[in-house]
Image (cartoon, rainbow, N blue to C red):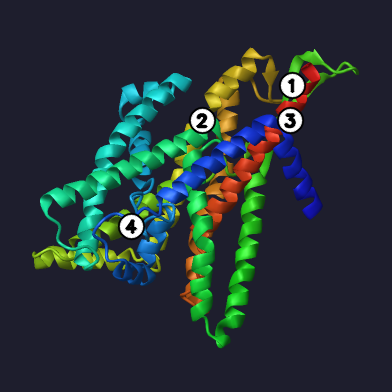
Amino acid sequence: MFNSIIHFFDKAVKTPSIRRKLLVTAGVLIIFRLAGHIPAAGINRETLTALFNGSPLLSLLDVFSGGTLANFSILALGLNPYINASIIFQMLGYVIPSLEALQKEGEFGQEKINQYTRLLTVPLAALQAFGMYALLKGQQVIPNLEPVALLSLVITMTAGTVFAVWLGELISEYGFKNGVSILIFTGIVARLPITLGQSASVVQSQDVLKVIIFLAVAVVIVGLVIFISEAARQIPIHYAKRRTESGLASTSYLPLRLNQAGVIPIIFAVSLVLLPSLLGQFLVNVPNAAVANIARTISTAFNPQSLTYNLVYFFLVFGFTYFYTAVVFNPEKISEDLQKGGGFIPGIRPGKETAKYLSFVLARLTVVGGAFLGMVAILPSFFQSFVGVQSLAIGGTSILIVVSVALEVIREIEGEMVMGKYEGLIR
């Protein structure tokens, strides 16, 4: 197995286009990690470390900042404002006709929506920067800043987010696709040795069996994620105008993946499910006692270990899986392309009937895929409570993102290698 892996990456490195993408991606990631260690001014680092060690919410939020929030660097907000802006425009596309029309205009429309998303990211980042300041000030991590110093902090953190988005788009354009996911992937992997070391230092001897069980379950979950990510329903496509040597109609297959949406539903869902708890912690120190009590109740209800948090998280993952699948896969367009190319599904009439059939099959697949993603996202949290070792640092969200992004990169490398073979034959 290891020989096969070594052979695969050896061939990948020797392919010029893949080697260029690897170098560009690696260079951008190095810049991202270096920038993540440039601290913002006026932070009590010892208090900040203690706060993150005692807060599962902030630790989870740090994952989606790419590991930069725990250092409170200039990239402390990470990509969260950009992700939230993307969610807003994806949702608005269903209620604003002009945005819906842009979504249907292909590459040009997507580029315009991306421009709007970047513009919305700036005010969202400024608001989140001020909210983070207020939250940490209430925990005595940040002193009460003068207006000029506060404005400087907000501008610095907003600029950090814009810089992180730019780095992600550099990866998407010149490296591998979906650079934002790759940045998050890098943050999770970079923090893994630290978090595992912290867990190992507090696990007592009587907990060793529980840790072994927990790690065994984590390995099983990784295997299931790979299996589900690779699973696909093969829809046979016949081409009447194309004939084989035996005179039969040529047949190919349209693969409908069980997890058509990839890792995006997880990133979207966790960005939303963290908002109530962050808002609650922001309002818990207000002078109004009634508002403070409501905020305290919200913070408790949406603790990452609570039942409410995990139920809401599950349904958000499930819902976003349906939502994003509808964005990335258009049955009407697929049906139209098949009809133009003279292809048809056996037993299904071309045109609208084909679109209905593809929608029906995709809906059934998405139910299974969405339910699986939701269960994997929340299962480690329940299992962590079951074994009674709260210090274990393996989360379903992190596992899903790491495995899914790794598989997407491998698929892209395989596609480049196949394309390189065809180009070699043409030459």
Q: Earlier in the sequence, mark 4 or mark 2?
A: 4
In this view of the protein, can residue 264 be seen by the observer? no
At horizontal 36% and vertical 63% (from top left) the residue drawn is 57
Residue under pointer 3: 418
Is 380 located above or below residue 107 in the figure? below
**Mark number displayed over residue 186:** none
Residue under pointer 4: 72
Tally of numbered discs: 4
Q: Nearer the viewer, mark 4 or mark 1?
A: 4
How far apart are labels 2 and 1 at the CA level? 21 Å
Q: Nearer the viewer, mark 1 or mark 3?
A: 1
Residue 256's x, y, as percent?
63, 36
Asked which secondary structure carries label 1, the reply is helix
How far apart are labels 4 and 1 at the CA level? 47 Å
- Disc 3 residue type? Val
- Disc 2 residue type? Glu
Residue under pointer 2: 173
How far apart are labels 4 and 2 at the CA level? 28 Å
**Mark number displayed over residue 423:** 1
How far apart are labels 1 and 3 at the CA level? 9 Å
In this view of the protein, can residue 53 be seen by the observer? yes
How far apart are labels 4 and 3 at the CA level? 43 Å
Quick check: 127 left or right of 97? left
Is 325 located above or below residue 355 in the figure? below
